[in-house]
Amino acid sequence: MSGYHKRDFEPFPVHTLKRLERPTTKIQDDQVKRVDERESGFNKALRGDYGPHLQKERARFVTKHPISGALSWMTAYLRDVVDGLVASQKAPLPEDPALLSRHIKELAYFLRVDAVGICKLPPYAVYTNSYPNGDPVELNHKYAIGVLIDQDWRTAEAFTGHDWISNAMSFLAYSRSGFIACIIADYIRRLGYPARAHHARNYQVVVPPILLWAGLGEMCRIGDCVLHPFLGPRFKAAVVTTDLPLLPDKPIDFGLQDFCSKCKKCARECPSGALSLGDKVIFNGYERWPSDVEKCTKMRVGNPKGSGCGTCIKVCPANKPYTLFHRAVGWAVRRSSFARSIAVRADDLLGYGKPKPENKWWFDLEDVDGVLRIPTSKLDSGDVN
Ligand code: SF4
Ligand code: SF4
């Protein structure tokens, strides 16, 4: 959000959303096993589990475009500033969780997040072991604050979903959300309470369950992906965990489980076939749509025609600008199953989800051994080079 625009407390009308005691995704809390960070798809690729070619590509798949390379380089500086000393005395603040939550949210919006939510930290959201050394993770903070950053609608409208700007969109949101999370955590420690930031360069938590419990979205058909009611899937998140007394938000229901069961557009368009057209399954205690992490990782890391992939985000009917028209459609879709059926069909009929090459603003460039070149792979998008 731009500081030039008048803003209310919350940029989106989240106070109008239906709130529930539990997320719309069924979670069997006692069945969810904590996961080891070393077993993520990207870390497996780096370890060589997907073969030597993808191991080599994993080391360069972000930096091979100069914009994502620059963003990723800057994010690396945030790796070691996630935690620090806590002030020896608590600041003279009222220990009022509602007031402190409002204050932390105001701070997050002041720092230009697009959405923020608070929950109790679910124990199963903490990794068992960290990457790369496998050190056991001990994290006993009571609360988690999720902050979301939009990946930019105009760019999301212009790109194909898997061309040279894809990783830059991801790292724009990773770097900004990580930067803001580090500032919020530092501020809380100055108030005299423990706090740690978690971002793309240094996580101790799994993000999706935190976003669900913090009322920042519902689980969608795109694997392990939470979809926000106003940003759609077009965001990345960072987290702050803390013992500052806070008032948790409640999970939300905006009809997404019904919408995703009808829509399936991400699964139809996914270039690697990683997403399922079928029904939900129980996986590690979650009832969710299955996805093939290996196929998705191979596409994002090994994409020869671009840098990364975000085709599922690009084509999703929830990836829309925040205009009066789309707000009205969103209002109806959140309230009516019939409106959801119409919206699913209309999205294809109106041609949404296609690239808009006339708005393409970036250059297609590939870093090969430190030298920028025009990619030799045939491009399937408009070209300004
Ligand atoms: S990022 Fe690309 S490969 Fe992965 S699920 Fe989305 S569309 Fe498929
Ligand atoms: S494309 Fe459709 S099915 Fe996939 S996440 Fe978006 S709304 Fe759900």
Image (cartoon, grey):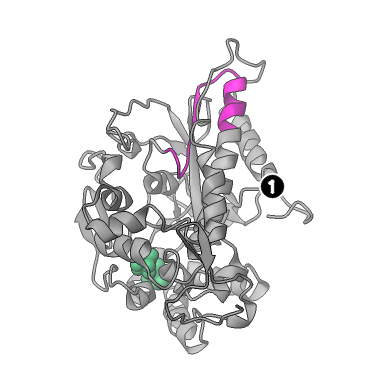
Q: Residue at x 31, y 37 (%)?
A: 132
189 in the magenta segment: yes
Above-or-below relation of 174 to 95: below
Residue tagged by mark 1?
9
Q: Is residue 20 left or right of residue 72?
A: left
Q: Is residue 98 visible?
A: yes
Q: Can residue 146 be spotted in the picture? A: no
- Using the rendered view, name the quadrant where residue 187 is placed: top right
Considering depth in this image, is 139 or 228 the residue closer to the camera? 139
Question: Percent from the top left, x then y, of residue 327?
Answer: 61, 69
Query: Which contiguous range is marked in magenta?
Result: 184-202
- Disc tally is 1
Q: Position of residue 68 (x, y in %)?
A: 53, 57
Q: Nearer the viewer, residue 80 or 65?
A: 65
The image quadrant that residue 206 belongs to is top left
Judged left or right of residue 322, residue 207 is: left
At 55% from the left and 30% from the top, the residue drawn is 185
Q: Quadrant of the N terminus?
A: bottom right
Q: Position of residue 316 (x, y in %)?
A: 45, 72
Q: Nearer the viewer, residue 149 or 257?
A: 149
Q: Nearer the viewer, residue 385 or 184?
A: 385
Residue 3 x %, y %: 75, 51
- Residue found at the far top of this picture: 88
Kind of residue at disc 1? Phe
Q: Residue at x 63, y 76 (%)?
A: 325
